[in-house]
Image: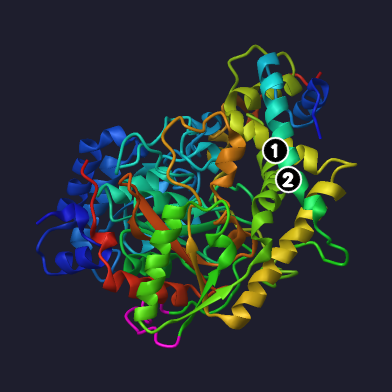
Amino acid sequence: MKLSDEEVRKLADLARLYLTDEEVERFGGQLTDILTYVGVLSELDTEGVPETCQVTGLSNVTMKDEIVELTDPDELLEVSPLDKKDHQIRIKRLM
Amino acid sequence: MDLNWLSIAEANKGLKEKKFSAEELTRSCLDQIKATEKLNTVITLTEDHALKGARAADAAGFDHVLSGIPCGIKDIFNVKGFKATNGSRMLETYVSPYESTATGRLWRDGAVMLGKMNMDDCACGTTNESSYFGPVQNPWNAEYVPGGSSGGSAAAVAAGQMPFALGTDTGGSIRLPSSLCGVVGLKVTYGRVSRYGVIAMASSWDTIGPITRTVEDAAIVLQSMAGHDRFDATTPDIVVPDYSANLGKDLAGLKIGIPKEYFGEGVDEEIRDIVMEAVKEYEKMGAVIKEVSLPMTKYGVAVYYVTMPAEFSTNMSRYDGVRFGHKPEAETDNLLDYYKHSRGEGFGDEIKRRIMIGTFSLSAGYADAYYKQAQRARTLICRDFDEAYKEVDVLLAPVAATQTFKLGEKTNDPLALYLADALTIPACAAGLPSVSLPCGFAKNGMPVGMQIMGPQFREDLILQVAGAYEQVTDWHKQRPSI
């Protein structure tokens, strides 16, 4: 599995990552090495083996649907690095 | 009295007997942090907060064994009002608006935070070199890495800066640095300690545990943190045993399994010999040694580096630089561009690699061959352990397959760094508890550790087995000359 520059750019785009040309080139080789290494799993016969979904036997854990205010919403807004107005975060235009 | 090298249990005794105050103990730790500052173990020092906490403990008394005990917290934990950088530029300025359950329980019991500890960028690394805040040095020799990702926590405990620190272990991030720094590191059963408020890496693998200088101390810290939490649905509501109760009990008749794959090809000969010496000690104590096989061991790293990046890339998608995170320096004129530059600037190389691997292995057309196949292989790893525990009570093995790296030695070879976790990943895959403890030194003077793995929720048993070895050896009493 060898990743082309174009494929690396596509992955970065899907993952919302800006990469420089130098990064595209460097990561392409490294990701190819990693994917080649993990390719060893294809030699395993896993016919009829279920996928791991949990390891401690828990399933369908439920809790009461009740509202608990743990933190002041404005305190949470404080964490944003962007400007705030009327308890809202001001973002860049969408398009 | 040298306060820097006391265990938690010893410090508690001294505090109760008024041989020293909690403030003196805390000051002594702060002094040592400053004297050994070059190790770069701490990202945020919380000196005033610590002194205030220590004075409060002095006023309140020492009913709980953790009252007035100083500690470090890996910078992946949210501690309300303090920065939690996650070792990353992405969260360089992030201040936690809430408290993690694990740390909240430590403060309830009176522990005192000295600082937030250095770690690999977003807990992704095996050497602590990927930290945005610079690498950590190994206290035993500044040329060597301390291991990662909880490298700051392990190095600080090894350097006498504090009696304990918290770490997290997803693929080996507590046990590897503990082994490389010559201290005790406990990776708990998945779900034993709540992950609430701990920045997520790979959610079906992440665990929280203590790094200490003695096995007894690991039991003490676990006792405080363990148990059900309504904010983490993966913490079962089952009894929390007394983790210190079995310490000191003899091991006669206990069956210890030696998984042959952990001593075979790819494992350094010197490390193998040192760990086999420890096996002989157990034989002398009356334990029954039995060779077992875990044939899936060689697939552990591959399983991990498919499923972990899949979960990791999913978790990391929340970093948008809007609700929290890095505001990009680059000029951006729309939101999509803003996201890409926030993440491009905020994440280090290893984060980007793992996000892209995860994005790849979950993408249409590849998910079956990579992600689903790895999840099936993970089931086979779990079955390996199930079979082994039919024959033996615990498993004993080296922690690191190779000698400790020097700083910079493997920086440009991600795959070589991944293999450093080859012997710690399988226990994580199966959600098993495992404790790392020192068992000797290599010729280069660096500590070597072994791990005792047990069945799920048997932390009491592995601590008993580890504690018995500690009783008959003095590796844990060795100190680095720093």
At label 1, which amino acid type do we have? Ile
Q: In the picture shown, does residue B351 fall above or below A67?
A: above
- SS assignment at label 2: helix
Q: Chain of mark 2?
A: A
For the residues beneath circles 1 and 2, the answer to whether they share a chain is yes
On-image quarter of the C terminus of chain B: top left
Main SS of residues in magenta: loop
Q: For residue B427, what is the image quadrant?
A: bottom right
How many numbered marks are there?
2
Label 1, on which residue?
A34
Res A72 visible: yes
The local crowd at label 1, few if under 14, some if 14 to 19, many if 20 or more residues have their Cα within 10 Å, is: many
Find residue B13 and report its horizontal and vertical position in percent.
18, 69
- Magenta stretch in the rendered image: B242-253
- SS assignment at label 1: helix
On-image quarter of the N terminus of chain B: bottom left
Q: Residue at x 64, y 71 (%)?
A: B385
Label 2, on which residue?
A38
Find residue A92 and report its horizontal and vertical position in percent.
71, 20
At label 2, which amino acid type do we have? Val
